Amino acid sequence: MKKIVLLLFTSLLSIALIAQPLNVEKRLQQLIEETPAAGLAVVVVKNNKIIYQQNFGYKNLENKEPLTAESLFRIASISKSFTATALLQLVEQKRISLDDDVSKLIGFTVRNPAYPDKIITLRLLLSHRSSLNDSQGYFNLDVIDPATNTNFSKCYNQYSPGEGYQYCNLNFNIAGTILERLTGVRFDAYIKQTILDPLGIEGGYCVDSLDNQKFATLYEYKAVENKFLPSAGAYASRSNELTSYQLGRSAPLFSPTGGLKISATGLATYMMMHCRMGKYKGGRLLKKKTATLMQTPLSADGSDQYGLALWKTDKLIPGLTLTGHTGSAYGLNSAMFFDKQSKNGIIVICNGSKVTYKEGYPLIIRDALQILYQEFLQ
């Protein structure tokens, strides 16, 4: 009798495990069809283990080539956390301090003209509290260098550094250049050596060093034409520019602020390291104290929830505060969020959709996160 009961229980359990992926896949497939979206890559982590990963839709719409686990995406602003992680490793080594003057680190004056005596520190740079803005662009450092731009003052807001928050891509292209100046190693190579290689992740910031056959095409949805158009600039070769590359000045070429190419599974591996407060299978990338600092919002009044390239939000999963980052560029939307208490996390990457927003987040990202949470983690 006990044997029969055990067999029955095992059979029911097997049916339940099969039914769960079938249900979630039906819901996610319906989501990309109704949105619509080009493709969607998802990974679910439970207790610091990948328990589900799947791809929906296309890597290339023109050839109807499906997304796979090996597909590489330009993940946009989640890239910022890699730049911050590398700099925080140098802080741990006491080669720099978060309170160092950015002017000294970058080699030219970085001061808000309205507050010339107020130092802009590395901490303010990494938390978007530097008073800098992107109004003059951020693809090279000439815009912020007084020696190369007479209108450099337009790069600054009217409030004092440390007294306000504004998300700014220029902050992290400066940060990536500082990393290069400190190490004497080209930005893309340094990130690969110190973060990607230890974690065993395929990817990088240099398009020309990666297998372009694995790139998932990024698409922008054009409402007037009612169709998706590929974003040619997402994976544009930099081989010509690299011939005149200046170490310690040209790092924005790789976009430390948003240019990392990585798979959804690779990003999940990286996320688990942060969820484990710097630990990974081979050791540590960050000390627990540093990882905690990175995940702690800096605003005293709670007006923003940004730490050092990671932020907290309760707008994605009702009743749950998560830590992570999103990315949006060239039509792509991405999300990496985790709960360090439960050691659960979710990766969602969409390579192009008809984007609508709810509470500041693309609806397809928000809905996919909620579906995955409900099906696997709730």
Image (cartoon, grey):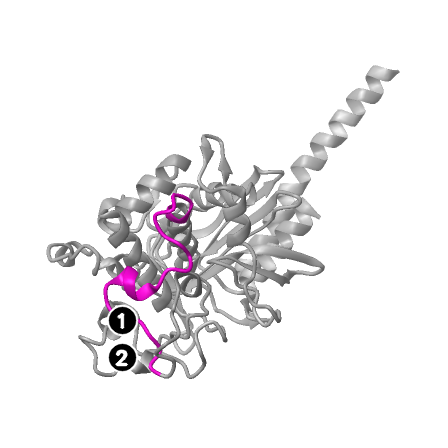
Disc 2 target residue:
152
User: x%, y% of residue 356?
Assistant: 53, 71
- In this view of the protein, which residue sits in the foreground, 354 or 33? 354
| Rendered residue at 45%/46% (across/down) | 267
Disc 1 target residue:
109
Asked if 304 appears above or below 270 in the picture, the reply is below
Asked if 90 appears above or below 126 in the picture, the reply is above
User: x%, y% of residue 145?
Assistant: 23, 72
Prevailing SS of the magenta stretch: loop
- Mark 2 residue type: Phe
Q: Is residue 282 left or right of residue 202?
A: right
- Mark 1 residue type: Thr
Label 2 to label 1: alpha-carbon separation: 11 Å
Which quadrant holds residue 249? bottom left
Please tell me whether mark 1 sits on a helix, a strand or a loop. loop
Residue lying furthest left in this view?
A: 243
